[in-house]
Amino acid sequence: MKIATWNINNINRRLTNLLRWLKTAEPDIVALQELKCTDGDFPAEALRKAGYSAVWRGQKTWNGVAILSRGGEPVVTRMALPGDREDTQSRYIEAAVDGILIGCLYLPNGNPQPGPKFDYKLKWFRRLSAHARKLLNAKVPVALIGDYNVAPTAIDIYPTRSWDNDALVQPRSRAAYARLLKQGWTDAIRETYPDERIYTFWDYKRNRWARDAGLRLDHLLLSPQLKKRLKNAGVDRAERGREGASDHAPAWIALK
């Protein structure tokens, strides 16, 4: 089974890229973030023709998350992250697919920091950690996947000081991610490649793709029940270099 996550950065604008990748990569389950479309504008029919059923939660202009499946249809278990009824941003969706619970998330960016946006990021992280602990306690196969908007360690960002004030690399952001792992989650890509510089995001600015000036922001965290099934993991870097590409590339795992 192949499970992937991709911050698509506007699903309708990148639909050609997405459909091409689905055909060639043949993932079984895909989590998408930053749809940047309303529920009514989600391209469900195009995806259905490509062999994928979908559940989604859109939002006009920004955010938006979706889960695609080419096996059984996703059965939605949550349409939002618990813990704050006043939070209306479309950043989390959860569904059971082929015996696995998939949590698709788009964690807040947090910039500029310090400030309200960074405070929201940390609060969202705390809510995620609380929910993640409950999922672990259920002792079922779970994958929490998506754009975490955190480069967890120095090896997850190209050698530079230019991002030092960015919310993506702040000590409090990294500490929140580390606390999540300590609950018992496995970072699948880092588990597979413990010492390699692997990136999933290259900003459009300052020729960063051509310079391979990237960050690893997109993560696939596995519960113990899934860790033992992990065969391989990787990033489809070539997708970032295509015409009209998202600034993220798909990250994926292969399970026994």
Image (cartoon, rainbow, N blue to C red):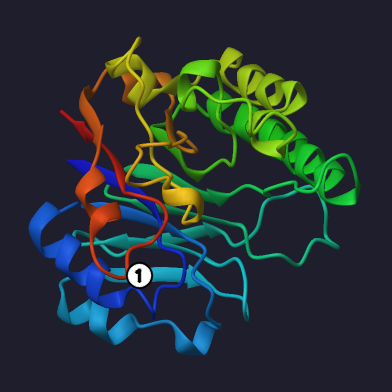
Residue at the bottom extreme? 40
- Which quadrant does the N terminus fall into? top left
Residue at the left extreme? 24
Q: Residue at x 55, y 49 (%)?
A: 105
Q: Is residue 59 left or right of residue 215?
A: right
Residues packed near mark 1 inside 10 Å, few (<14), some (14 to 19) or many (20 plus)? many
Task: Find residue 125 and report its horizontal and vertical position in percent.
Answer: 72, 37
Q: Residue at x 34, y 15 (%)?
A: 191
Q: Nearer the viewer, residue 91 or 153?
A: 153
Q: Is residue 25 left or right of residue 181?
A: left
Q: Is residue 86 above or below residue 200?
A: below
Task: Find residue 91 and report its horizontal and vertical position in percent.
Answer: 62, 58
Task: Find residue 22 and report its horizontal and vertical position in percent.
Answer: 18, 62
Q: Residue at x 23, y 76 (%)?
A: 16
Q: Nearer the viewer, residue 97 or 237?
A: 237
Q: Is residue 127 above or below residue 223?
A: below
Residue to which mark 1 is pinned: 54
Residue at the right extreme? 115
> From where the camera sits, is residue 90 visible?
yes
Q: How many marks?
A: 1
> From where the camera sits, is residue 52 visible?
no
Q: What residue type is disc 1 on?
A: Ala
- The image quadrant of residue 21 is bottom left
Task: Find residue 63 and report its horizontal and vertical position in percent.
Answer: 60, 66
Q: Residue at x 66, y 18 (%)?
A: 179
- Which quadrant does the C terminus fall into? top left
Instruction: Indicate the secondary structure of the residue bearing disc 1.
Output: strand
Q: Is residue 181 left or right of residue 3?
A: right
Q: Is residue 202 above or below residue 196?
A: below
